[in-house]
Every structure is written in structure tokens, then in C-alpha cells.
Amino acid sequence: MRFLLKLLAAPVVLALTLFVWLCMGVLYLSSLVLGIVSTIVGLLGLAVLVTYSVQNGVILLVIAFLVNPLGLPMAAAWLVGKVQDLRFAIQDAVYG
């Protein structure tokens, strides 16, 4: 019975491993691109804040915060970490 459980869990663990690797690669590339975008939007937000409208400048600064590596990419990294925790839990429960 234990061998059957190991046989059924192996594809799940493999799929979760490949999914985490793929997500981490996409997350790395998106953080790189979004870091550049957030810098541009942040500078634009400061310029709009000083010259044009306080409300529009604050909106641009909030958007810059959400796309920088501490905003939405950090939430995605947390979620990928939880998927990896699930993989380790399955692996520990089945394979000991």
C-alpha cells in the first residue's frame, strides 16, 4: 500500500516542482521589468505631484509602489512559497 501511495504522489510532486521553477523564473523576469517600470512611473508621479495635480501624483506613486518589487511581485513570491511548502509537505508525508 505504501508503494502505491509513493507511485501516485510522484507525479504530483514532480508537477509542483516544475510549477515552482516556472513561477520563480517568471517572477524573476517580471520583477526585473517591473522594477524599471516602477522607477519611471515613480519619477513621473513626483513630477506630476509637484507641477500638475496632487491627486494624480499620489495615484501614480501608489501605482509605482504596487508594481515595484515590494508590491505585487512580493505577494506572488509569497504565494509561490506556499505552493512550495505544499510540495514539501506532500513529500515529507509520503516519502518520510
Image (cartoon, rainbow, N blue to C red):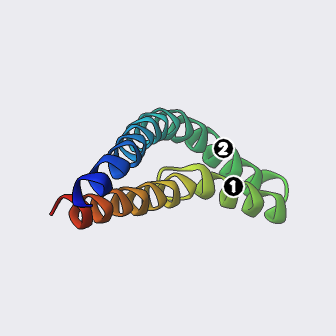
Residue 30 image point, x, y percent: 52, 37
Q: Secondary structure at mark 1?
A: helix
Q: Quadrant of residue 11?
A: top left
* Image side of residue 46 versus residue 29, left or right: right
Tell me whether the residue at label 2 lies in contact with that at label 1, contact meaning CB atoms closer than 8 angstroms.
yes
In front of the other: 92 or 77? 92
Identified at 53% across, 35% down, the residue is: 36
Identify which amino acid the numbered label 2 is placed on. Answer: Val
Quick one: which residue is furthest to the left in this view? 96
Q: Quadrant of the C terminus?
A: bottom left
- Foreground tag (2 vs 1): 1
Identified at 53% across, 50% down, the residue is: 68
Q: Quadrant of residue 38?
A: top right
According to the image, label 1 marks what residue? 63
In front of the other: 40 or 49? 40
* Image side of residue 70 versus residue 62, left or right: left
Q: Quadrant of residue 15?
A: top left
Identified at 55% across, 42% down, the residue is: 39
Q: Secondary structure at mark 2?
A: helix
Placement of 58 over or under 23, stated as above or below? below
* Image side of residue 37 versus residue 47, left or right: left
Residue 16 image point, x, y percent: 41, 47
Residue 52 image point, x, y percent: 84, 53
Count of marks placed on residues: 2
According to the image, label 2 marks what residue? 41
